[in-house]
Image: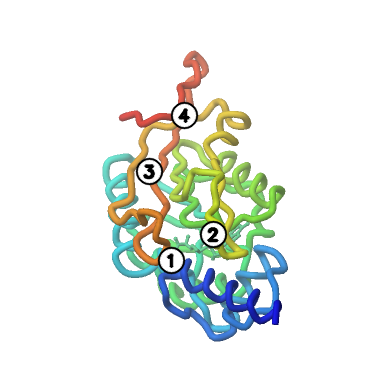
């Protein structure tokens, strides 16, 4: 009986996070959460996708912000950590792009989807060997990094691989509602950046066009945060809303 109630609550949390839609049958019958990497591989290999944030109006909003940023800056290359199934990427206008993902199925899907596009390459995260780009991206990934060491590794790679700018699209709070799905953990990542990457400063924070207002079936709890390297002579600034 207790197990049945627990399973019903887990299903409700997963359904709630993905906007009331069942994204795959296997996802709803997954017995337990065994880690962020295996969660995503299992999800993609059983027919699931990158989630509600990578489709529809949310994907269009994300693409509009990043495409506009790229249009206003002379940037030659982009690296994304957590490229997903490639649906979000299909809306992007990047000069050259290298996408990494922890899921082999996602990487294979992206290679197939963009096989004729020579500006795009995809690799497994474990095949990251210090490549760098003008702009690095983490979109809808940070609140899926449940493990502390995985989070720290993602953040370190994200900043160390960038020559100029980092764009993060994520929630920025440590508070997680009680019914948060097991593959979601919100983090105040700006605190980590202040402590570990003091040479980087926040230059823009862009609120979501479709904020969730606490209801995870509508909109998104993520916002855009754009960082650039501080010149050696500059003191780090506080992470509040600043315009470039
Ligand atoms: C919600 S999807 C977002 C995909 C894409 N960034 C987008 O905006 O559509 C999260 C993605 O992050 C990937 N991921 C999870 N942990 C990761 C990690 N430590 N490093 C790289 N990718 C990771 C998952 O496999 C998944 O494809």
Disc 4 + disc 2, Cβ < 8 Å:
no
Count of residue discs: 4
Is 51 in front, or is 179? 179
Q: Residue tagged by mark 4?
A: 201
Which one is in front in this view, the residue at disc 1 or the one at disc 4?
4
Q: Is residue 77 above or below residue 59?
A: above
Which one is in front in this view, the residue at disc 2 or the one at disc 1?
2
Q: Residue tagged by mark 1?
A: 118
Q: Residue at x 58, y 31 (%)?
A: 197
Disc 2 + disc 1, Cβ < 8 Å:
no
Q: Position of residue 107 (x, y in %)?
A: 56, 70
Q: Residue farthest to the front?
A: 1
Of callouts 4 and 2, which one flags the residue occurring earlier in the amino acid sequence?
A: 2
Q: Position of residue 161 (x, y in %)?
A: 57, 43
Q: Is residue 214 left or right of residue 149?
A: left
Q: Is mark 2 within 8 Å of ligand 1?
A: yes
Of callouts 1 and 3, which one flags the residue occurring earlier in the amino acid sequence?
A: 3
Mark 1 and mark 4: span between their CA atoms? 33 Å
Q: Is residue 52 left or right of residue 173?
A: left
Of callouts 1 and 4, which one flags the residue occurring earlier in the amino acid sequence?
A: 1
Q: Residue tagged by mark 3?
A: 75
Q: Is residue 126 above or below residue 200?
A: below
When asked about the image quadrant of residue 132, the answer is: top right
Q: Position of residue 50 (x, y in %)?
A: 48, 69
Q: What element does badge 3 sit on?
A: loop
Mark 2 and mark 1: span between their CA atoms? 20 Å
Q: Residues within 10 Å of mark 2 (few under 14, many from 20)?
A: many
Q: Residue at x 61, y 29 (%)?
A: 195
Of callouts 3 and 4, which one flags the residue occurring earlier in the amino acid sequence?
A: 3
Disc 3 + disc 2, Cβ < 8 Å:
no
Mark 3 and mark 2: span between their CA atoms? 20 Å
Q: Residue tagged by mark 2?
A: 82
């Amino acid at each position: 009986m207790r197990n049945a109630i627990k399973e019903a609550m887990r299903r409700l949390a997963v359904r709630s996070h993905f906007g009331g839609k069942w994204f795959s049958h296997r996802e709803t019958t997954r017995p337990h959460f065994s880690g962020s990497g295996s969660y995503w591989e299992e999800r993609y290999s059983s027919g699931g996708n990158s989630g509600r944030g990578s489709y529809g109006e949310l994907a269009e909003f994300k693409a509009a912000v990043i495409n506009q940023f790229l249009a206003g800056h002379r940037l030659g290359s982009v690296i994304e950590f957590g490229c997903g199934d490639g649906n979000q990427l299909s809306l992007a206008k990047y000069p050259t792009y290298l996408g990494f993902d922890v899921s082999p199925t996602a990487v294979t899907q992206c290679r197939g989807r963009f096989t004729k596009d020579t500006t795009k390459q995809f690799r497994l995260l474990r095949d990251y060997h210090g490549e760098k780009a003008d702009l690095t991206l983490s979109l809808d990934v940070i609140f899926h990094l449940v493990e502390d060491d995985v989070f720290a590794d993602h953040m370190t790679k994200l900043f160390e691989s960038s020559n100029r700018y980092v764009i993060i699209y994520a929630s920025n709070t440590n508070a997680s509602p009680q019914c948060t799905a097991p593959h979601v953990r919100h983090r105040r990542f700006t605190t980590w950046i202040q402590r570990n990457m003091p040479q980087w400063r926040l230059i823009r924070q862009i609120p979501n066009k479709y904020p969730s207002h606490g209801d995870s079936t509508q909109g998104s709890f993520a916002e855009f945060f754009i960082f650039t390297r501080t010149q050696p002579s500059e003191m780090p600034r506080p992470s509040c809303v600043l315009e470039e």
